[in-house]
Amino acid sequence: MTAQNPGRSNPMRSAFRWGGGVLVLLLLLLLGSCGIGMVGSVIQPGDVGVKIKTLGTAAGVDPKPYPSGWNFKGLGEHFVEYPVIERTYTYTREADARGTENEEITFADNNALSMTADVQLVLQVNPSAAPALYKRWRLSFDDLLDTPIRNDVRTAIAAEAEKVPVQFLYQGGRQEVIRKALTRIQAKWEPQGVHISQLDWIGPIRYPEVITQSIQATTKANADRVAAEAKVAVATANADAQIATAKGEAESIRLRGEALRSSPEVVQQIYAQRSAGLCPPGTKTCIIGAGAWGLVPGADADK
């Protein structure tokens, strides 16, 4: 029997050790790729976490919502966050905090006249409903805003705007349209745990130029008509006032004439007052001037 040299390594044992090292290395790489380096994740304040499991028989969406703060996650698990405090989001033509793409809302009136507008909505997610919300849509909240919620906002506004003419929108009816659109959206998303409290226009609706000019011309014509009617009303009022004054003066003269005819002594008194005492009452002939009380031609000078 040949004795083994203790200084010599066993080939099988060396292979086993080498294979074990490779296995440990692969496991570490796998854990790192799954984000298990710190075996946890921080849910931001104001958000709720939804845990998604990708490995094992329990793979899927964890029905338990996870609060803000540090939360444990295992192998093949990650979190998706939804906001649980009210936040404002916009769909605009111009670039905003959510990106540079054009997200304006397009709709039409009851004559299929196309127009666009920017809108904003205020919403939040019910924490207990967050897991079911993700399970249904399989979307992050930003993706939820960009696709299904935005589509529903556009559909709701279009459905209400197509019931009215553009003049109705231009003259203040747009607030009624946006209010009814909000009711439509709430009816769909509230049961899913998304509470949308506000939907508002941002700035004016962008109408086609030809419609803007037409509406402005109509508005000016109406303003001119109202101004003309006001002038006519003023002129009529002035004429009525002059007629009333003339009638008053005529009535005054008539009443004075009747008074004088019914009182002759008053007439004599007026004559006496106007002659300033030069012609005594009752005289048949009164000559006022030089020698008014002188001799009558042919009379005796000594008398």
Image (cartoon, rainbow, N blue to C red):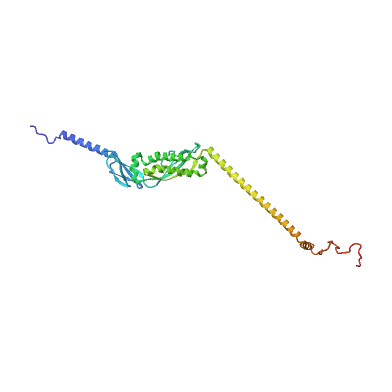
Residue 93 visible within the image: no
Q: Is residue 276 left or right of residue 184?
A: right
Say if residue 173 shows up in the picture.
Answer: yes
Q: Is residue 239 left or right of residue 39?
A: right
Say left or right for 188 vs 252: left
Nearest to the observer: residue 295 or residue 40 = 295
| Residue at the image position 39 percent from the left and 39 percent from the top | 148
Residue furthest toward the bottom?
Answer: 302
Q: Position of residue 288 (x, y in %)?
A: 83, 61
In-front residue for pair 242/148: 242
Q: How many marks?
A: 0
Q: Which image quarter holds the C terminus? A: bottom right
Residue visible at 34% across and 41% down? 134
Judged from this view, the residue extending furthest toward the front is 262
Q: Residue 31 location, x and y as percent?
A: 27, 39
Report the side of 273 relative to 61 (left or right).
Answer: right
Q: Position of residue 180 (x, y in %)?
A: 45, 43
**Is residue 243 positioned above or below 138 on the image?**
below
Q: Quadrant of residue 156?
A: top left
The quadrant holding residue 29 is top left
Which residue is farthest left?
1
- Front position in the image: 112 or 17: 112
Residue 173: x, y in percent?
50, 44
Identify the image quadrant of the N terminus.
Answer: top left
